[in-house]
Amino acid sequence: MSTASPENQLLLPEPSAEQRKVLERIEQQRERLHARSAARRQALALREEQHSVDPDAPLSARLIAFARLHPMAVAVAAAAAVVAGPSRLVRWAGFVLPLVSRFRR
């Protein structure tokens, strides 16, 4: 419980035992709320840190991070790959991979 200054002690009467219990419960609740909000802020900071993608990370790590951040896009791409079939995928890969390797330089 917070300590009162001498001026406040003159103005307010001393709380009774029941009032002290209520005041202590209020103080405990405030501490719990402060701890809870601090834990929430910390969890949000950790979540933001996990969602950030290091641009200098290897391509595989960036792809995994992309898959975690955008699961629906990965599911749509996987569904399109299944519908297209293996022969078309090989043809598209033969066209796209050289373009990607040029952009990476």
Image (tube, rainbow, N blue to C red):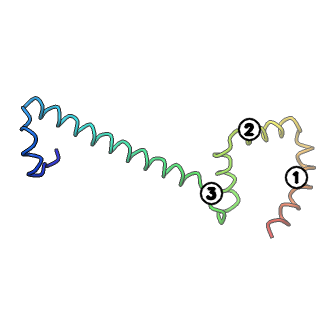
Task: Choose the circle earlier in sequence order: 1 or 2.
Answer: 2
Left or right, 12 with reference to 94: left
Left or right, 49 with reference to 17: right
- Which residue is more in the foreground, 103 or 95? 103
Residue occupying the point 88% across, 42% down: 86
Contact check, label 1 and label 3, Cβ < 8 Å? no
Task: Choose the circle earlier in sequence order: 2 or 3.
Answer: 3
How far apart are the alpha carbons under marks 1 and 3?
Answer: 25 Å
- Which residue is more in the foreground, 100 or 29? 29
Q: Residue 93 carries which label?
A: 1
Image quadrant holding the N terminus, namely top left
Which-is-in-front pick, marks 2 and 3?
3
Contact check, label 2 and label 3, Cβ < 8 Å? no
Q: Position of residue 77 (x, y in %)?
A: 79, 41
Q: Which mark is residue 75?
A: 2
Task: Choose the circle earlier in sequence order: 1 or 3.
Answer: 3
Left or right, 10 with reference to 52: left
Q: Where is residue 78 in the image (x, y as percent from the top left)?
A: 78, 39
What is the crowding at mark 2: few (fewer than 14 residues within 10 Å), some, or many (at least 20)? few
Contact check, label 1 and label 2, Cβ < 8 Å? no
What is the crowding at mark 1: few (fewer than 14 residues within 10 Å), some, or many (at least 20)? few
Which-is-in-front pick, marks 1 and 2?
2
Q: Where is residue 11 in the image (x, y as percent from the top left)?
A: 10, 43
Q: What residue type is labelled 1?
A: Ala
Q: What residue type is labelled 3?
A: Val
Q: Which mark is residue 53?
A: 3
Q: Where is residue 18 in the image (x, y as percent from the top left)?
A: 10, 29
Of all residues, the one furthest to the bottom in this rendering is 105
Q: Which amino acid does label 2 sit on?
A: Ala
